[in-house]
Image (tube, rainbow, N blue to C red):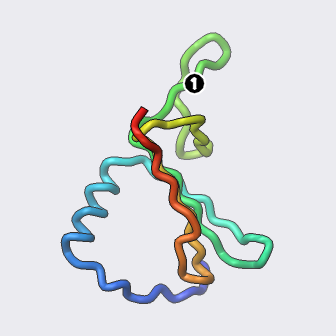
């Protein structure tokens, strides 16, 4: 999709198991874009519960597959990361603390 080759990072089986558990525990959203320098970026948004919002007099669950979630706090149920595929680097990671 981005035309970049991802190099082997040497993940151990334990690392892969940890990632697999993390993957099952969280809902994830991906936003792919090019920054102003032309680098290809993937933004990962992750949360353990689908949030509800009060809208038009009722609580509605976020349509998380079509709408990006931007928590005001999120507690320990939320983390996000920005990955620069062009530079093969993790630009930022935010892990919210417990409420």
**Residue 74 or residue 16, whichever sits in front:** 74
Q: Residue furthest right?
A: 36
Q: Position of residue 41 (x, y in %)?
A: 63, 70
Q: Quadrant of the C terminus?
A: top left
Q: Position of residue 14 (x, y in %)?
A: 19, 70
- Indicate whether 9 appears above or below 43: below
Residue that badge 1 annotates: 53
- Secondary structure of the residue carrying numbered label 1: strand
Quarter of the figure with residue 67:
top right
Quarter of the figure with residue 18:
bottom left
Task: Tally the numbered discs.
Answer: 1
Quarter of the figure with residue 8:
bottom left
> What residue is drawn where x is 38% and y is 48%?
26
Q: Position of residue 89 (x, y in %)?
A: 54, 77
Q: Badge 1, how many Cα within 10 Å: few under 14, some, many 20+?
A: few
> What residue is drawn where x is 54% and y is 46%?
65
Q: Residue furthest top?
A: 57
Q: Position of residue 95 (x, y in %)?
A: 46, 51
Q: Is residue 94 left or right of residue 8?
A: right
> What residue is drawn where x is 39% and y is 41%?
48
Q: Is residue 22 left or right of residue 90?
A: left
Q: Quadrant of the N terminus?
A: bottom right
Q: Is residue 55 left or right of residue 12?
A: right
**Residue 82 or residue 30, whichever sits in front:** 82
């Amino acid at each position: 999709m981005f035309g970049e080759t991802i190099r082997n990072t040497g993940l151990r089986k334990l690392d892969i198991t940890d990632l697999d558990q993390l993957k099952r525990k969280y809902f994830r959203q991906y936003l792919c874009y090019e920054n102003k320098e032309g680098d290809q970026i993937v933004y990962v948004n992750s949360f353990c519960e689908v949030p509800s919002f009060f809208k038009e007099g009722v609580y509605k669950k976020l349509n998380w597959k079509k709408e990006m979630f931007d928590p005001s706090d999120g507690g320990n149920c939320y983390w996000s990361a920005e990955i620069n595929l062009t530079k093969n680097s993790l630009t930022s990671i935010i892990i919210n603390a417990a409420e």
